[in-house]
Amino acid sequence: MTTTDNQIAKGRRTILVLLPLVAFLALAGLFFFRLGTGDPSRIPSALIGQPAPKTDLPPLANLERDGKAIPGVTNDVFKGHVTLVNVWASWCVPCHDEAPLLDQLAKDKRIQLVGINYKDSADNARRFLNRYGNPFTATGRDDNGRASIDWGVYGVPETFLVDRDGRIAYKLVGPITADNLTRSLMPEIEKALRP
C-alpha cells in the first residue's frame, strides 16, 4: 500500500468515526431549537374541531352548590353552552395555583365550567373544592383515567374549550395562568362566543 492509499484509508476511517458524532450534534441542535421555540402549552390536539369525546362520568358524591347536588359529566352538559372543561386533581400542585383563576372564570355567566376529577379520592377532591371554591356546574369522577385518555390528556391540569355545538375549539396544556388567560384562553373564548 502506498502512502497515498494509507492517507485515503485513514481519511475514510476518520469520516466513519466522525459521522455519528456529526449526526448526533445535528439532531441535538434540532431538538434544542424546537424545544426553545413556541408555547409548550399549545401542544397540537387531533381533537380540535372534533366533537367532544363520549363522556359519562359519575358525580363527585356529596358535592353541592347553592344547596343542589352537582351532577356528573355527560355530553348533554355541553349542548348550547360555551364550556371550559378542566381536568384537575387535588394532588396536582399546579391545580392549586390555577384555582383562583378558575373561580374568576366561573363569574363570567357567558360560559360554564365543567370539571373532570382525575384519579383522585373523593374526600380529597371535596376538600380541594371546599378550600378554593367550586367553580364547576358539573364535576365527574375519572377514577381510572379512561375518560381523560379519550380527551387526549397528557397530564393534569389541562383545559378544553368546547363550543355550543359540542366541538372542541381549543386545548390548553398545563395550568391556567394570568398570562395565558389573557393572551390565549380569553381570545379563544371570545371567538367561541361569537354567533
Image (tube, rainbow, N blue to C red):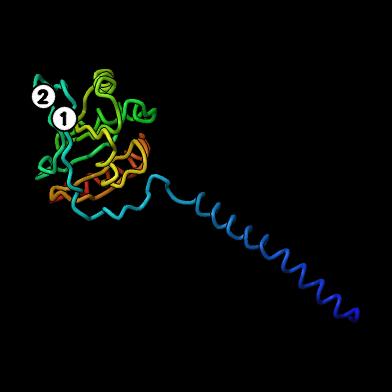
Q: Is residue 38 left or right of residue 45?
A: right
What element does badge 1 sit on? loop
Q: Quadrant of residue 88?
A: top left
Q: Is residue 7 left or right of residue 156?
A: right
Give the vertical position of 65 relative to 168 (above or below): above
Q: Quadrant of residue 65?
A: top left
Give the vertical position of 27 relative to 161 (above or below): below
Label 2–label 1 contact, CB within 8 A: yes
Q: Quadrant of residue 103?
A: top left
Identify which amino acid the numbered label 1 is placed on. Pro
Residue plotted at (38% across, 50% down): 43
Residue that label 2 marks: 69
Q: Quadrant of the N terminus?
A: bottom right
Spot occupied by residue 113 in the image (x, y as percentages of width and height): 20, 35
| Residues packed near mark 2 inside 10 Å, few (<14), some (14 to 19) or many (20 plus) | some
Q: As rendered, which of 149 and 66 lies closer to the eye? A: 149
Instruction: Indicate which disc, 2 or 1, sits on the residue closer to the N terminus.
Output: 1
Residue that label 1 marks: 59
Marking on residue 107: none
Spot occupied by residue 115 in the image (x, y as percentages of width and height): 22, 34
